[in-house]
Amino acid sequence: MDSYDLLVIGGGINGAGIARDAAGRGLKVMLVERDDLSAHTSASSSKLIHGGLRYLEHYEFRLVAEALAEREVLLRVARHLVWPARFVMPHVPELRPRWMIRAGLFLYDHMGRLAPTFGSQRASLPGSHAVRLDAPPYNSGLKPDFRHGFVYSDCRVDDARLVVSNVMDARRRGAEIRTRTECVAARRESDGWRATLSGGRIVSARAIVNAAGPWVKQVLNERLGQPSQDGIKLVKGSHIVLPQLYRGDHAFILQNDDRRVVFMIPYGDRHTLVGTTDVPFEGDAATAAASDAEVEYLCRAAGRYLARPVDPAHVAWRYAGVRPLYDDGTADPSAVTRDYTLRVDADAGSSPVLSVYGGKITTYRRLAEHALHDLAPFFPELKGEWTATEPLIGGDFGELEREEARDMFFARYGLLPQEHLRGIFRRHGMLAYDVLGSARTLQDLGAYFGAGLYAKEVDYFVAQEWAVTAEDVLWRRTKAGLHLTGAQREAVLRHMGRVS
Ligand SMILES: Cc1cc2nc3c(=O)[nH]c(=O)nc-3n(C[C@H](O)[C@H](O)[C@H](O)COP(=O)(O)OP(=O)(O)OC[C@H]3O[C@@H](n4cnc5c(N)ncnc54)[C@H](O)[C@@H]3O)c2cc1C
């Protein structure tokens, strides 16, 4: 039987972040994910690294301050996957008065500038200001009635790839990663936990981290036999992807008449992402799907602002995720806290299980630090915090700016088409060199499936990134699924049948 210090259950962003942090502090870590990495909530987000402007209305100051600080940290340590964006809010006087928006943005900018108090360097993103929406660059796609608005900064992220990057980084620091492996049961023994994994393997661990997202309570109660007082509130959020609704790199934050906000965000080069909804959810989160009513809601919310109607028939893709929120007793699903709570259950001071309730992609790194802080009493040998300054695997550009590092990559593979190299660099950062290796010409990349996806990269996903099914490759490691025909997707599937 293999023994570990820490068994992490769940390969979403929180499990991935904790596994990496713990491995880097010298613990022997195993991470088990019963499905694919980021198969559930962590690849279904709005893909924002943000303070959460709207949380100010709910007085979530701690969360906003921490998230704004993390924005700065992630811009440094995950530069290959996180990038700044400008967010435009058209002004609608009957929904929120100008003074209120100005006050909110002032606070947001100000809290962003205080970020160094959380350990990062000076805030790097430009502040907010009022803008005209009846002239370029922000008028594209909008109804001419919207003449005034505000612009502020936040960041965007490739959520699924952030998870993979954390897990790869954990592996390089010695963690053992098992996907398609469920923690079926675990029980406390005198010297730690004995966990049974799917397939019958039994491992022992000094502590367990329960980062099972929407299943956190179920894992605690049913798999680990630990009754818990804490509640989890499941809130479904759906997104739709449409052919490009406006030109430009900026995103829109649209006020809706139910007081919620909906984002419109560029998605790849040719699409726009619109989301999200907040719908109470019951049942198995794995079955969550975007309903027609949600699609109509999102089309209406965007259509209110856009010159051309947004027709549900034009939706190219829809997806849904379930937020595993800590139940703070609030009835309105939009108002339930987005902050996280960590709970340690320890039996007579030994063999703890730490459970993660809630959280954001944005705060995953800090959440991991908090988790290890809480576990530190059980691991006297644990090293100190390190993830705020150490780039994630693939994100180490040294002194170079991202564009400079990318141009060097282009130069190294000068015989290959730049449009394809751009996609590979965006997905892998400095690991793009490992993906292409000694390839020089297109022939060296093997079969071409479309949307910039070659056999060479698919083979890398299988060999290095735990991809098993075509879905893993087409909808999580890349978003090529959106652009490929049925026949092209079949070709990927057939190819993977050969390489795996
Ligand atoms: C619609 C929506 C939009 C969002 N937008 C944003 C955003 O823009 N920015 C932001 O910062 N945050 C956002 N969030 C929040 C963020 O996505 C979540 O907080 C985060 O992804 C939760 O990650 P997790 O690791 O806790 O859960 P998950 O990603 O769900 O991971 C849990 C994993 O545990 C696995 N698991 C469960 N049981 C077992 C078992 N017994 N054995 C092995 N594995 C198991 C599951 O298969 C799953 O993969 C959004 C959330 C939603 C739903």
Image: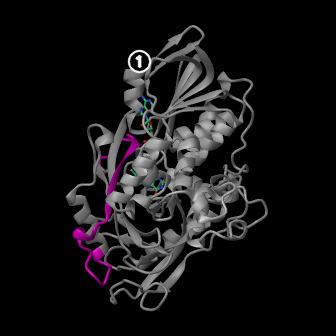
Residue furthest bottom as drawn:
135
Image location of residue 250, percent across then percent down: 49, 75
In the picture of the structure, the residue carrying the numbered disc 1 is 225
Is there any visible trace of residue 6 in the rendered image? Answer: yes
> Which residue is found at the position 54% from the left and 66% from the top?
154
Q: Foreground residue, 31 or 426?
A: 426
Residue found farthest to the top: 190
> Which of the pair 332/83 is nearer the observer?
83
Q: Residue at x 52, y 41 (%)?
A: 466
Q: Nearer the viewer, residue 226 or 432?
A: 432
Q: How many marks?
A: 1
Label 1's element? loop
Measured from the top left, where is residue 164 in percent x and y?
Answer: 55, 46
Which color scheme is applied?
one colour
Q: Is 345 located above or below residue 212 in the figure?
A: above
Counting other residues with Cα less than 10 Å from the Cα at mark 1, is it few (<14), some (14-19), or many (20 or more)?
some
Which residue is located at x 50 percent, y 60 percent? 453
- Does the stretch in magenta take in 316? yes
Residue 367, can we see it?
A: no
Q: What amino acid type should be assigned to the residue bearing mark 1?
A: Gly
Q: Is residue 162 left or right of residue 184?
A: right
x and y percentages locating residue 469 in the rendered image: 42, 43
274 lies left or right of 207:
left
Residue 197 sits above or below residue 415 on the image: above
Which residues are drawn in magenta? 303-332
Tell me if residue 227 is in the magenta stretch.
no
Q: Quarter for ligand 1?
A: top left
In the image, taking residue 204 as reference, residue 122 lies left or right, namely right
Quarter of the rendering occupied by the N terminus:
top right
Q: Please, is residue 114 above or below residue 17 in the view?
A: below
* Up-down relation of residue 40 to residue 157 (above or below): above
